[in-house]
Amino acid sequence: MEQESQNGAYDGRVMTEEQMETLRKQIAIYAVICDQLVLLHNSLSYFPPLSSGMNPMDGGYFDPMVASSSAHGMSTRHRWTPTSTQLQILENIYKEGSGTPNPRRIREITTELSEHGQITEKNVYNWFQNRRARSKRKQAQTTTMTAQADDTVVTAEDRRSCGDSGGGFESYEHILFPSPDLGIEHLLSRDKFMES
Amino acid sequence: MEQESQNGAYDGRVMTEEQMETLRKQIAIYAVICDQLVLLHNSLSYFPPLSSGMNPMDGGYFDPMVASSSAHGMSTRHRWTPTSTQLQILENIYKEGSGTPNPRRIREITTELSEHGQITEKNVYNWFQNRRARSKRKQAQTTTMTAQADDTVVTAEDRRSCGDSGGGFESYEHILFPSPDLGIEHLLSRDKFMES
DNA sequence: GAGATATGAATGAAAG
DNA sequence: CTTTCATTCATATCTC
């Protein structure tokens, strides 16, 4: 408190250098924290379609819910769900397509499937990846259950566990960042449906 | 910009009321954003922190489930998972590093990251490979299916500022961002005292 | 509402 | 570097 109160030459309130510094630090801390939160979020999340087969007349992106159709209520939250038509086509392609849809083909497929619903190349890509992996896994499982009687031995290399349980939070996927450069208001609008 | 320089008659630097207000708003905005981000995180992640902060010795490995089952030969988790601290650092390096981290740099990075968890050069190498490849792919996809009017989308790569211009707030971009090594772990691990 | 299962998505690692 | 594989996570749906 040396020099803060007799700033006569100015009628508006002012801050001392000290106060300024304090404020600056606060801001800096918040800025860094915020920055890192956003960064963390970015690296852990991914936002879907947004603008694939989107007509300019749609105005907003990402329909809240088209689901009132009839079949099943695809909840349209984040996760893409293939329509039955799309699924059919995908299965067909998977069967005959000798298992390896090259990226070029992915594009075609996506284009075709766009006729039957919102979809992205990434969706198609993921679908094939998962389809194959799970098919393989299932097969392996059924194959494995032949003769396996004396497998009660664990190789010593396996016992590397019992570390700690650190590095835990990887679950930011559900934090939506609707508009990166807008205020926080959009962030706050989590749907809080009380009941239905 | 107009009338902030005539607070003479004072040797210590001071702020005008206007500047003060600006700073105040800045702080408020950051505070709210951070608060909400943390809140969102906390309310949306159902499993407890697992880690009471980030001890330097917490490795990337954390197998919750021991390889108890003896059935599978190649079992268990040998997969490295970066801690959030490591991820931040990697992201930073990726951003500023103009692309190709030469093997010598890889080594440095690995050394640095070792402070924050178990890691190998191979991990770092892979990470950069993957990072680049996926960044590229993502860009390709968004570029492909973007006709126009995708102003609502920011490529996930370069959006990381938090409270800068745009949207509903005034421009606060004349704020200095000092040391970016604060860490948000303190914020996220709020219930470090709970045990199961 | 708590488990069980199915599946879309993310990502470390490896193959090509 | 590019593409693919394998594993894991998160969520949706279903059942009890």
Image: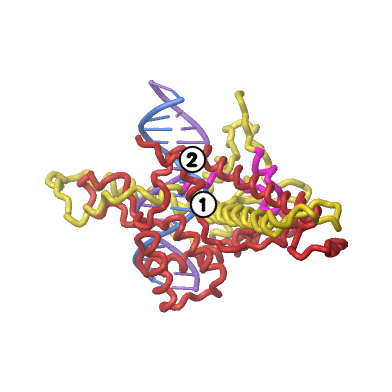
Chain colours: A yellow, B red, C blue, D purple
Q: Earlier in the sequence, mark 2 or mark 1?
A: 2
Of A142 and A10, nearer the camera is A10
Question: Which mark identifies residue B45?
Answer: 2
Residue type, label 1: Ile
Is residue A85 at least partly visible in the picture? no
Same chain for the residues under marks 2 and 1 in the image: yes
- Kind of residue sitting beneath label 2: Ser
Q: Residues within 10 Å of mark 1 (few under 14, many from 20)?
A: many
- 10 Å neighbourhood of mark 2: few (<14), some, or many (≥20)? some
Confirm whether the magenta stretch covers residue A176: yes
Q: Quick one: quadrant of the N terminus of chain B? A: bottom right
Q: Which quadrant does the C terminus of chain B fall into? A: top left
Does residue B109 appear anywhere in the picture? yes
Nearest the viewer among B117 and B143 is B117
Direction left: furthest residue = A150
Answer with left or right where residue B150 lies relative to residue B83.
right
The image position of residue B18, as x and y in percent, is 81, 54
Q: Which of the 4 image quarters holds residue A121?
A: bottom right
Q: Quadrant of residue D16?
A: top left
Q: Which residues are magenta?
A: A170-189
